[in-house]
Image (cartoon, rainbow, N blue to C red):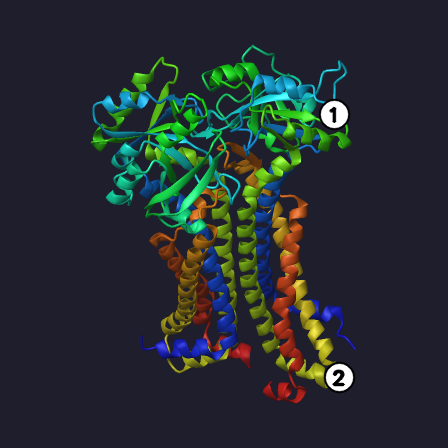
Amino acid sequence: MKYAGLVLANLRRNKLRTALTGGAIMLAVVLVCLLLTMPAGLDALLANATNNTRISVHNKAGIVYSMPQSFVRKVRQVDGVAAAVAMTWFGGAFEEAGRVTFPNFAVEVEHIGAVYPDYPITAQQLADFRRYRDGAIVGRQIMHKYGWKIGDRVTLRSTVWPVNLDFRIVGEIASDIAPLFWMNREYLDQALKAQGRSGLGIAGIIWVRASDPNRVNAIMRTIDDLSRNSEAETACETEKSFFSNFFGSLQGFVTILLIVTALVALCLVFIAANTASMAVRERAGEIAVLKAIGFGRRVIFGTLLAETATLSAFAGGAGVLIAVGLTRALRVFSGWSEALGPLGNFIVTVPVIVQGICLSLLVGLLAGVVPSYGAARKSVAETLHEIF
Amino acid sequence: MLLPLSYSLRNLRARPGRSLMTAGVIALVVVACTLFLGLISSLKRTFATSGDPLNLVVMRKGSDNDGSSQLSLEAFHAVRFFDGIARDAEDRPLASPELVVQPFFRTRSGGRENVLVRGVEPVALAVHDRVRISEGRMFTPSAHEAVVGRGVLGRYAGAELGNALEFGRGKWKVVGIFDAGSSSFESEVWVDVRELANDAKRTFPYSGIRLRVAAPADLEPLRRRINDDPRYALEAQRETDYYAKQAKSADSLYVLVVGIAVLAGIGAGFGASNTMYAAVQARTAEIGTLRALGFSRRAILSAFEIESVALSGVGFLVGAGCAMGLSLVLEWWIGSVAFGASTFTTSVVTLHVAASDLVGAFVLALIIGVCGGLGPAWRAARLRPIEALRKA
């Protein structure tokens, strides 16, 4: 700490260079953090949104294949099942967007709360969901994206069923993890029957909550056995495996992102190393004089290294702060983007911040080591000889 | 009088370490930018080029993709005989009834993806004339056979010629592989439409019709006639429009990538600036001498600007070389990138970085060179000869 003054004075010596180097490092850290938020969004979805007692039951052939609605009653009878809810894809397009921009499902209002006790929805909102036939519960991100509030009315045009339905928003899932839109299954069923159709006899996915995490595997086996040799054989999986399969196709994209992130980080090291070596070369004479008057090699090495490390730590810290702000803004403006799926969540998790800070420190150290070591090692006579 | 070009270029060689570092930074930016632009153009190639300008897509009114549309047999038989539809040698209309289902496929790595399976009749090959069986043969109806697109080949368990592909409720023998000019059709599996409807237990046998019009002039009248027919509530759109709409989902990706490239570019510009400033500082005396000799400010400014642009040029060349090399490695390593579109189907995008993707990176490198050098060059030109000489 004795040499802190020296380090700071050296940084102030060439303000323009310090600013340019700091700026470059800062931008690179912003980029790296921004890119890291994307796989973090995927991880966060898999880690937080999924619950180790929830099971998905769907047709073995695919989620676009359905199951008879009556199957959910059989599932509820299975030993160890605490609750089960049937969900059917509505494929509703919000008129202003013109396309399906968020997942929306018809659900059984009386069972949904029991399957998702971990979702932040108030008891009052769930009661309203049961009371109003046209009620809807909407994820926070969608509410943000379209500027909706509880009590608002919205119309969705189904791209699957031949209906347009009006909804009143009665509740909000106050979490970014579930960008969903839930509607009352009865409402859709009656709308279909009003058209002289047979109504909604199918379920797309049945979500089951097990009473005990240790019994999940047994429950999954029992349910699959129940459907064996029926018209719709099922395949059960845990919620985690369901989502990781569902978004598994984004892995290739994540790989490319990580490669780019690595390149950017490499860029950073180059920039900082370049500057550090310039700074050292410029002060060669000065360093020789310091050595000549008795400063040890270790001190010289340490102060030079501290210089790049301090700069990159400050710049990196600023970069992380900017990245956090920027991702917040991106979340508000872009909302849940369908093309990017969970990658578009831009979730800045604590690990992302830690990684950003570690990265900038590492860059400072890596960039400083070579020139500082070179300067510290050279003998006084050699250096002075080069100068004069 | 301007300074000779060799002055600027020699200066780069005079401090090879520093020049290489700066060129390296620019090269890395070029690599990152090229990879991203390559990814985007691969995406665009897959989605935007899928349609044929002479084709119409007929779906139920209000459906935004054929995966969610439903159509009855009567509707198909009515539309099939409308005027303006092209006919084959045996005078049959080129109208392809199609059913689209997205079952699970097991990937090689043990995961699963929703793959678009298209039920078609043999007429489909005449309507989609860019789809061409490149190996094997077309399926025989009612034999539980399938032909697979090039993107599907080898990606899923059993997706090889002669093997059995398992999806839906049964097994399908792969008898052919088709090529579709890198369009999204290459991510599909085609089987007999009746067998597929049976397998998926669809009440409506078709999800849509693809029509080929006889002449470009027939397209609009035919489209209007289908849209205005009160019996079936159908909607016809150009196939190119249909795929352009589907490709819109990649737009947010575009914005993101351009943003990343710009940020990285500014960062690299700072780095380049730094080197140039240092170069100016180190050569204060030299610049003073040059000014004293009578070289104008403009001469000094352009000499330094040329130096900076040359540096970014070297960076671009190195970066372009690395990017092309890396893209080959990536193509071999990742092969294709799968995208889950909003329709729940996986589009396999073959990652291919083309030379045209380097254009964007070139512009970026040029901007870095010009802007990065401007400040230092300006400072060098403004140095007063006497002060510069005294400082030294």
Q: Is residue B7 left or right of residue B146?
A: right
- Viewer-proximal residue among A327 and B86: B86
Residue at the spot of label 2? B294
Query: Residue pushed farthest right?
Result: B1
Question: Residue sitting at 75 percent across and 29 percent down?
Answer: B218
For discs 2 and 1, the disc positioned in front in the rendered view: 1
Please tell me whether mark 1 sits on a helix, a strand or a loop: loop
Q: State the quadrant of the C terminus of chain B.
A: bottom right
- Around disc 2, counting alpha carbons within 10 Å, would you say few (fewer than 14), some (14 to 19), or many (20 or more)? few
Identify residue type, mark 2.
Answer: Gly
Question: Residue sitting at 27 percent across and 36 percent down?
Answer: A52
Residue B161 shows in this picture: no
Residue A324's place in the image compared with A83, above or below, is: below
Residue A61's spot in the image, x, y percent?
A: 43, 22
Residue A115's spot in the image, x, y percent?
A: 27, 34
Q: Is residue B76 left or right of residue A327?
A: right
Q: Chain of mark 2?
A: B
Identify residue type, mark 1.
Answer: Gly
Query: Of the residues under marks 2 and 1, which one precedes in the sequence?
Result: 1
Residue B170's place in the image compared with A180, above or below, is: above
Residue at the spot of label 1? B84
Residue B333's spot in the image, x, y percent?
A: 53, 37
Residue A270's spot in the image, x, y percent?
A: 51, 61
Alpha carbons under labels 2 and 1: distance apart: 78 Å
Residue A108 shows in this picture: yes
Q: State the quadrant of the N terminus of chain B.
A: bottom right
